[in-house]
Amino acid sequence: MNRIVLKLGIIMMGLILAVLLPLGFVADKIFSNFYYNQITEEISELSHKYASSITSLDDDAMINMFKSLAYFTNKDIYITNAIGEVIAHTGIQIPLTNNELRHLSKGKSVQKNFEDRETSNTYLSYGHPIVFSDTFEGSFFVLTSVDDAHEPAHKIRDLLILSAVGAFFVGLGITFFLARKMSKPLIEMERATREIARGNLDIRVNTIPNDELGSLGKAINDLAVETNEYRTNRSELFANISHELRTPITYLKGYANALKNNLYKTEEEKQQYLTIIETESDHILRLINDLFDLSKMEEGQANLQRETVNLLEIVETSILKIKIELEKKGLKLVTEINRKSDLLIYADGIRVEQIFINLLVNAIQYTEKGSICMKVWGTKNNVHIVIEDTGIGIPEEDLPLVFERFHRVEKSRSRDYGGTGLGLAIVKNLVEIQDGNITVSSKRNKGTKFELSFPRVE
Ligand SMILES: Nc1ncnc2c1ncn2[C@@H]1O[C@H](COP(=O)(O)OP(=O)(O)OP(=O)(O)O)[C@@H](O)[C@H]1O
Ligand SMILES: [Mg+2]
């Protein structure tokens, strides 16, 4: 018996009892009072009738007639004279007090209860004065056992208890059935969550009721899917990182080894080896820095220093910084920049510059001849930047993937260009965390075009 079923069951049964017990108690009281009042009224009425219909206290025949009447109505009677002495009775006689006698002599009725010590029966009696031609002659009492009054109430109480016990057991059955039904998805979810925690991410919650529990079940399933994706991503990332590190480290090891064992012929060759070691170290360092940058951005901890900056100034410095690379490759830079008015954006200037430099360096890297074009203009709400080249282009099937970590078109050739495939992933993250947007379009061997926009501020 799982505990949640027990708890739910106990709570529901407690509720049922909390309703049934007071209800039964009140019903019992109502019935008892009802019968008590009814019987009091009855004996009061009877004693009144008898007292007014009796015509003589000495007539034995008449007294006997009243006794048999009492017998047939299942009541007892006793008759007193004017000084309170009992002159006739059917078995039980209760002495009158002076007070009661005074009351009766004044024409009032008297109600008195009496407990028979021997049988410990309580009797209820009602007496009316007997008056013959305006003189008080005695009193006529009709009495009955209180137990008689309570008997129907007791019967009803027994019935009530019986139906309460019945209701209790029916309730018990229904409660445990419902509690089981309600707790079943919960128990399944608990098991599923445990399995997920253990690493079994293919498990799913199958019982999805149409309520909050159902939402919880769906949330657990989503969690399993998300965690699975995360795990796949993570292992892919580790595989990529180790792959990316392996090549430069193999170079480092090889050339360091060659130097150590004096495997070079000339001083020039030695310098060459050292340069390779330096370049590969730089490559590893850049890879690590880029990865660190990316992971910080993906965790939402990019630490941006955002302020209102003039986009035109950033564009100028970015162009200045790539100028040497551009000239080395003999490429032309075409700019279409509207310098008439400032283009203000709310961003981290250094990070925006990083975006442009990354895109411009790519354009230079992947263009052998022709030109690189940079256009900048503003509309009412946005600023727009286009960086376009006449390079090798990106195949259509690679276009949706170029912003992903480590994605490179033709991996082996990209390595010749010195890339790690993190540049565009960083660019996309940087654009998006500064509320911007970036899209790419390209034609193979024709060129590539990156279009960016940022919200403009006044
Ligand atoms: N302007 C471009 N023209 C042609 N291909 C491009 C261009 N920009 C990016 N690519 C392709 O997209 C890939 C991903 O670019 P990304 O900048 O992310 O990586 P990378 O340049 O290889 O390495 P990194 O920038 O990290 O040094 C590149 O490997 C390249 O194949
Ligand atoms: Mg790049």
Image: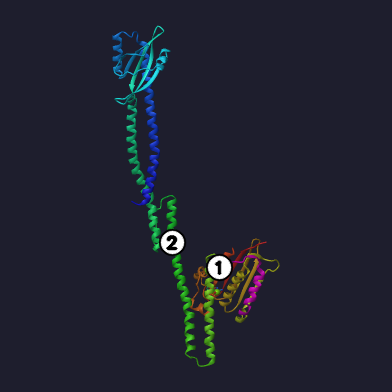
- Point out residue 259 in the picture as x, y percentages from the top left corner: 49, 88
* Along the viewing direction, whichever of 308 and 23 lies nearer the viewer: 23
Residue 390 can be seen, yes or no:
no
Q: Which residue is mark 1?
A: 428
Q: Quadrant of the C terminus?
A: bottom right
Which quadrant of the figure shows ligand 1? bottom right
- Bounds of the magenta segment: 301-325
Q: If you read the primary sequence from the N terminus, does the residue marked by circle 1 or circle 2 appear first?
A: 2
Q: Is residue 44 left or right of residue 441?
A: left
- Residue name at image x 33 percent, y 35 percent: 161
Check disc 2 and give the amino acid type: Val
Q: Is residue 390 left or right of residue 157?
A: right
Extreme residue in the bottom direction: 265
Location of residue 17 in the rendering, given as x and y in whole percent from the top left corner: 38, 40
Q: Position of residue 206 (x, y in %)?
A: 38, 55
Which residue appears farthest toward the right when viewing the image? 340
Q: Residue 47, percent across and down?
A: 36, 16
Q: Front-most of 380 and 234?
A: 234
